[in-house]
Amino acid sequence: MAVAISSGKLVIETSQNSKFENLQLLLTNHVQSYYLNKEVLSVEDDAVNYRFTLDLAQTLSAMVDDQQLDDVATKFTMMHQYTYTDETTGEVREYDRSLRIPVRREWQLANVERFWDAEHSHYLQPYVTKKNALAFLLDRELSLKHYVNYKVIRKIKVQEDRVAFEGFFDTLFFPLADCRMAIVERSGEKTYQRSFEYHSVETKYSRIYRYAYKIELTMAELSDYLKQLDQSNELSLDLFFIGHLAGTDAPLKFRIGNPRFITNYTMKGELALQDSAKKQWLSLVPYFTIKGLNLSFTFNAYQQDAYAYFRAHQHHWRAVAKQAADRDIWIIGERSYKAQDNGFRFFKYLREQHPEVEAYYVIRKDSIERKNVEPLGNVIDFGSAEHFEKVIQAKYICGTHHPDFLYPIRSKSYEQHIHAKRIFLQHGVFGTKNIAPFYGKSVVNGFYTDLFITSSQKEKQIAVSDLGYDDKEVAVTGLARFDSLFKNDLPVKRQLLIIPTWRDWITNDEIFEKSEYLARYRELLFDARLKEFSERYQMEIVFCLHPNMQAYVDYFKDAPVTIVHQGEVDVQVLIKESAMMLTDYSSVAFDFSFLHRPVLYYQFDRKRFIGQYTSHIDLDKELPGPITDSLDQIFDQLFQYGAQDFAMRPQDIQKADRFIAHRDTQSCDRIFSAVTQLQDKTVKEKIRSDVFYLKLQQRFRRTRKLYFPTMKFLYWFWSHFSAVKPNRIMFESSVGKRYEDSPRVIYEAMVNLYPDLEYIWVSRDNQPLQANPNTKIVRRLSFDYYRYLATSRYWINNQNFPTYLTKRKGTAYLQTWHGTPLKKMQHDQEVISGRKPGYLKRVTHAKNQWTALVSPSPYATKAFRSAFQYEGPVIEKGYPRNDLFFADDVEETRQKFVNN
C-alpha cells in the first residue's frame, strides 16, 4: 500500500485479493461520508491493483458546509467496503472496515501533511492512528506526542556541576528528520534549547523507528538561562524533545522519562552554581514526575549563607539532629507561599493551645500570606539556613501536600537524613478525582506519610482500600480548618460563590487561551441570565480565581461579577459568608456542603478531568448537589434554588453528612491527639513501606511459576496454624470482576442486620463500600486474598474460589451459583471443549468444598445434582438476586431504570 498527498489530492494505491469484489474507499465520521474515485491499475492472477483519489479541496468544503454547529464528530476515518461471495452457498457477505496500513507487508507514506482551504481558514490534518488506520481531523490539532511510541531513560548520573543521562525513544510510521532538547519553565515562557547526540537503532518492527541518545547538561551552559528565571519561588523545569518527522508535517514534542526502576530508585544529588553577583546559589534537583515518570528539575535560588550551611553539613546531618535530640520540634506548612489552609489553622492551634510544642511555620519571606502567621511567631524563611537545620531536627513534619514541599531542597541525599514522622493534613476532602497516582502509598517516586488525616469513615476506607494505607496509618479527625468553618461567627450574605479548580493539562498561556476551560467560564460570566439571576434574587456574584488562573484575570475583567484572588482573600471567609456555591470539582464544595448550603456542579469536561483513573466515589450518586454540563442546566438550577430561598435539598444534606464524622470545632484537638499517640514503625513495617520492597512484591506477583506455589503454601500454612475469625465473612462474585448477583444482595442485607461483623469483598473497585464503609476490599489472587480465605468463618460466592484450594475445617461455604441450568454442564456434557486437561477433576474438587448450594427451583436442583454430582445440602428458596422483583418498591425501581 502507498499513501500520499500531492497537488491537493489524496492518492492511495492498494491491492486486494481477487476473490473479494466491489472494493470502495470512503472517508467517514459515520455521519458524513465521502467516497474516493477508483481506478483499476492492473489485474493479476490472484489480486487486483487499484488507485483511489480524493479531491481534498472539494471534500474539505463539503465537510465545512455539512457540519452542524454542535457537531463534535471532527475525526474522519478511511474505511474500505467490499463483498465476498461464498462459492458453496452463494451467500454474498458485505464488509465495512477501517483501512489499515499493512505493517507486515510493504507500505509507504509520503507527504502526509495538513491541507488548507484557499482562504486558509479550515484544514484537514491527515494522520495514522495507533491501530495503523488512516484518518483525518477537521480543524483539530493532532497531539504533539501522537507519533511517539515508547521512551525510556536507562542511566542517569548527577554531579554538582552536571547531569548525564541516556536512553532511547521510538517514533511510529515516520522516521525522525531532526530533534532538539528543550528545558521549559512549567506554566511559564522561558525556554532553553540545544541539539543533542542521537542515532538510529534497528528494530524488528517496520512501523517503529528507534533512536538512542546521550545527553550531558552542565550548570555552566545553563547559567544564563537560570539567571533570568524568577528566583523568588520554587520552579519546575520540564525536559522536552522537540523535532520533525520525515514524510509528515505533524509536529513532534514530548516529555522524556520512564526510567528503569533501579535508575529512579538510586538517583540522588543536585546541581549547583554560584551566582557571585547576587551572592546566591542556583540549584537544580532532577526528579521523575509522579504521574508520568518524566524527567524534570526543581529550581531554587538560595542565599549564599544558607547554601553554605547546606554544603558544610551535607555529610554531618546526624550531628545536626543530635543537637536537638531532646527538643519537641514540629515543622508545619502548606505550599511555600501559602498560609491560610489546614497548615495555618493547625499551626495557630499549636501556638495558642500547646506552647510546650516547639512549632515552626515554613513560608517564603515575600509571600503575601506571611502576614497571617507572622504574629504567631516561630516563622522560618523557606530555604534559609534555619530551614535546613530545623527540618533535620524535627520530630514531626505536618503538611497539606507532599512532605517535600516543606523541605528546603528536594535532593534525595538530603531527604534520606530526615527522620521526622510525616503527617498529611490534607488540603481538602478527597474522592472526586482519583488521587492514587499522587498520594497512593505504593507510588515509587513519591508520597510517603506516617499519618493520613481524613474527615469521615468513608474517606478513611478509601485511603485504606484505594491508596494502600494500613488502618492505623489513617485517622478520622476532621480537617484543621473545620474548627473555624463551624464557628458561627460570620453572617451569611446573599452571595453566589463561583470557584473553579484548575486543569493540570493547562501548562502555558497558549494552551489556556485555546482551552474549553476559558471559553466555558467566559460564557458563564458574560451570560445575560447571570445578571438577571443576580438582580432578581439580590445576589452578589463572586468569582474566585484559582492561583494558577490569576495571571489571566484580564480575560474576565469586564464581567459583571466581583473577582477575587485566592491568597488575597481567605477562601474560608468566602465559604462561610456565601449562600450558594457553583464549582466544578473543587474539594471546597464539601466544606460548603457541610454547612448545609446548596452546591451546584458544572462538569463540562468530566471525562478528561477525571482521566484514566476512575473516581473514588460515584459522582452522580454521591456528590452533595446537582451536576450540570451546560449553561441552560446551570441557570435552570440557579433559578430553582432562588425560588426556594437557597435551601439545600434534604437528599444532598444526607450525602454531605456521609463525608464528615464530626461537625464541631475540635478537629485540631483530635489531630494533635492522633499525632502524639502515633507509634514508631517497627522494622517490619518500615520494610513493608519501602518502595524497593513494594517493587519486589510487584515483580514477585508477576512471576506465576513462583508466586502461585508460594500462595498455595501460605494458604495451607494459614489454614492449619492460624485461627478462624468467627465474625469474618468473605464475598466474591463473577471471579472478583463485578459487584453483583446474589452475593451482593446477601451482603447488603447482612450489613444492615449484622453491622458488627467483619466483611471482606473481592472486588476491583470500591462499590461494596457504598453499603458498608468498613468493608475490607481485596483484589482476587492477591496476598491478602489467600490470607482472608484461610481465616474466614464463611465464604459466599456465585462461582468458584480457586479450584486448587481446600476449605479448612471450621469454614462454611455457601455457593449461590449464577443462573438457571438450561444448558448441560460439567458431568452432563458428552464432550467438553475449550477446557484445559483435568477440568472435571478441578471443578469436582471445588464442588466438594461447598457447605450448601442455593437453588431457584426443583428443576434447577435436579440439574445441579446431576451436572455437579453434588449430594450436599441444597437451599431451594430461590435466588436472593430475584428479591427485588417482589419488593414493595418494585415499581419505583423499574421506573428508575426506565428514566435512565
Image (cartoon, rainbow, N blue to C red):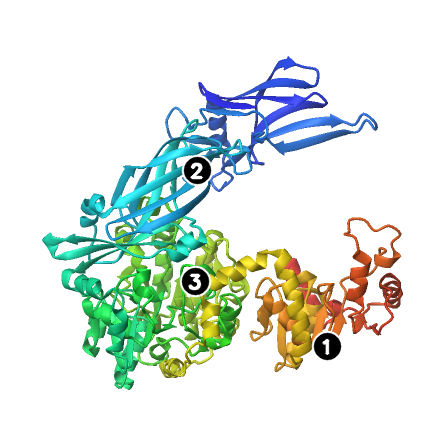
Secondary structure of the residue carrying tag 1 is: loop
Residue 305 as seen in the image, left or right of residue 668: left
Contact between marks 3 and 2 (CB within 8 A): the answer is: no
The tag on residue 811 is 1
Q: Which residue is mark 2?
A: 142
Q: Earlier in the sequence, mark 1 or mark 2?
A: 2
> Which of the two marks, 1 or 2, is nearer to us in this view?
1
Percent of width and height locating residue 15: 62, 21
In space, the residues marked 1 and 2 are separated at their CA atoms by 58 Å
Q: Earlier in the sequence, mark 3 or mark 2?
A: 2
Residue 559: tell me if it is visible: no
Percent of width and height locating residue 467: 49, 66
Percent of width and height locating residue 629: 47, 54
Q: Amino acid at mark 2?
A: Leu
Task: Report crowding for label 1: few under 14, some 14 to 19, many 20 or more residues within 10 A (C-alpha).
Answer: many
> Which of the two marks, 3 or 1, is nearer to us in this view?
1
Counting every numbered tag in the picture gives 3
Foreground residue, 410 or 129?
Answer: 410
Secondary structure of the residue carrying tag 2 is: loop
Q: Earlier in the sequence, mark 3 or mark 1?
A: 3
Q: Which residue is mark 3?
A: 638
Q: Amino acid at mark 1?
A: Thr
In space, the residues marked 3 and 1 are separated at their CA atoms by 56 Å
Residue 36 as seen in the image, left or right of residue 189: right
